[in-house]
Image (cartoon, grey):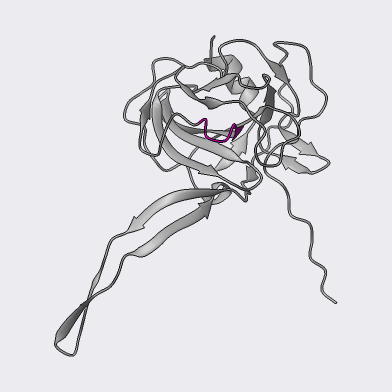
Amino acid sequence: MLFIGAMAVATSLPAAAFGPGSQLGAANQSHTQVLGEQSLFVGDVPAASLSRDGYSVLKAPAPARTASVGGYNCTVDAPAESTRVTWPYDHPVKIGDGFGPRAEGFHKGVDMLAGADTPVQSIADGVVFATGDGGTGGVFVGISHTVGGQRICSMYMHFVEGSLRVSVGQIVTAGQVIGITGRTGNATVEHTHFELYYADNARFDPIPWLNAHASY
């Protein structure tokens, strides 16, 4: 009889929170391959023409593909260098589960416990490369930025259903509200699961990076 191992969950179930404005230390800095079960819209495949036996057949466009967030690399260039970096919220918030190992598996981001209906903002100028609704991350947004001459992507999860204010391909600015804090997907309380990663697609602890680059 075959035994199927349990899958690691890439998103968040917040645990005990620290005080307002608390920040995690530089805990586990090891990179890990991204996993995920959420879906995102990739786009329509254009119609193609096939030629056979002297006649042509126009194939109907293929349906839109989906891909897991975890399998989507940070490959989209931001239109310009961001001159400002901010936190996902415009004020200090409590931090629940941090980056690194936990009972459910390796946690690839941090849980920011801002409370229900709190606006979430883009951390820098950039372009939206992914949005979706479903899976463990619930309603999510992915944004590509250029900071210090390097491409970096930010991912935000668990927004309130119907609260997204951005779409794929949209240019955003630092501090622009992109959605509302919720608990869609695999979440027990309202919060934002927040991730950062470079073109290698390996998540890293966002707190030290935000401490070094961001301001309110």
Magenta range:
158-163
- Name the residue: 61% across, 46% down: 34
x%, y% of residue 56?
17, 80
Spot the residue most to the front. 162
Q: Is residue 8 above or below residue 22?
A: below
Q: Is residue 107 above or below residue 191?
A: below
- What secondary structure do most residues of the magenta stretch adopt? loop
| Quadrant in the picture for the N terminus | bottom right
Q: Is residue 115 visible?
A: yes
x%, y% of residue 158?
62, 34
122 or 24, nearer to the observer: 122
- Name the residue: 83% across, 69% down: 3
| Quadrant in the picture for the C terminus | top right
Q: Quadrant of residue 48?
A: bottom left
x%, y% of residue 14?
76, 30
- Name the residue: 59% across, 31% down: 160
Count the marks.
0
x%, y% of residue 84?
43, 15
Asked if the stretch drawn in magenta spans residue 159, the answer is: yes
174 or 81, nearer to the observer: 174
Q: Quadrant of residue 124?
A: top left
